[in-house]
Amino acid sequence: MNYFKKLGTANLLMLTLCAMIILVAEYLFLNGHTEHGLFVGLWAPTLLGVMIYLKLVDNDGK
């Protein structure tokens, strides 16, 4: 539980959102909507990149 406190609520929420995006993309892709699945699937790495950028900007100010 200490790990989740260290991670922070915002980061935990964004990681949960990434997991849900991946599941929706898998669902779309496997049900025949391949282009939609690929498009939605690209949101997760983009969101993770934004998280990393925000973390770097936050650490630079310290």
Image (spheres, rainbow, N blue to C red):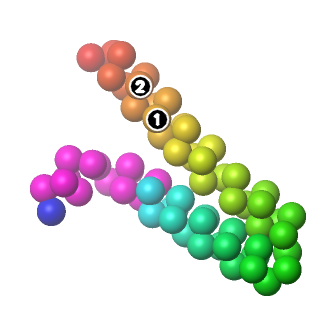
In the image, what residue occupies the spot 32% across and 54% down?
9
Instruction: Determine which residue is flagged by label 1.
Output: 52
Q: Tell me, yes or no, whether the highlighted magenta stretch contains residue 5.
A: yes
Q: Which mark is residue 32?
A: none
Identify the amino acid type marked 2.
Answer: Leu
Q: Quadrant of residue 37?
A: bottom right
Identify the amino acid type marked 1.
Answer: Ile
Mark 1 burial class by Cα count in 10 Å: few <14, some 14-19, many 20+: few
Mark 2 burial class by Cα count in 10 Å: few <14, some 14-19, many 20+: few
Q: Position of residue 31 (x, y in %)?
A: 79, 83
Secondary element at tag 2: helix
Instruction: Determine which residue is flagged by label 2.
Output: 56
Q: Residue farthest to the left?
A: 2
Q: Position of residue 41 (x, y in %)?
A: 69, 59
61 versus 20 height, above or below: above
30 versus 54 height, above or below: below
Residue 19 vs residue 24: left or right? left
Q: Quadrant of residue 21?
A: bottom right
Which corner quadrant holds the C terminus? Answer: top left
Kindly check if marks 2 and 1 are in contact, taking CB atoms under 8 A apart as contact: yes
Q: Tell me, yes or no, whether the highlighted magenta stretch contains residue 24.
A: no
Q: Nearer the viewer, residue 36 or 6?
A: 36
Q: Nearer the viewer, residue 6 or 22?
A: 22
Q: CA distance from mark 2 to mark 1?
A: 6 Å
Q: Magenta part mainly helix, strand or loop?
A: helix
Residue 15 vs residue 7: left or right? right
Q: Residue farthest to the top?
A: 61
In the image, what residue occupies the spot 55% across and 69% down?
20
Which corner quadrant holds the N terminus? Answer: bottom left
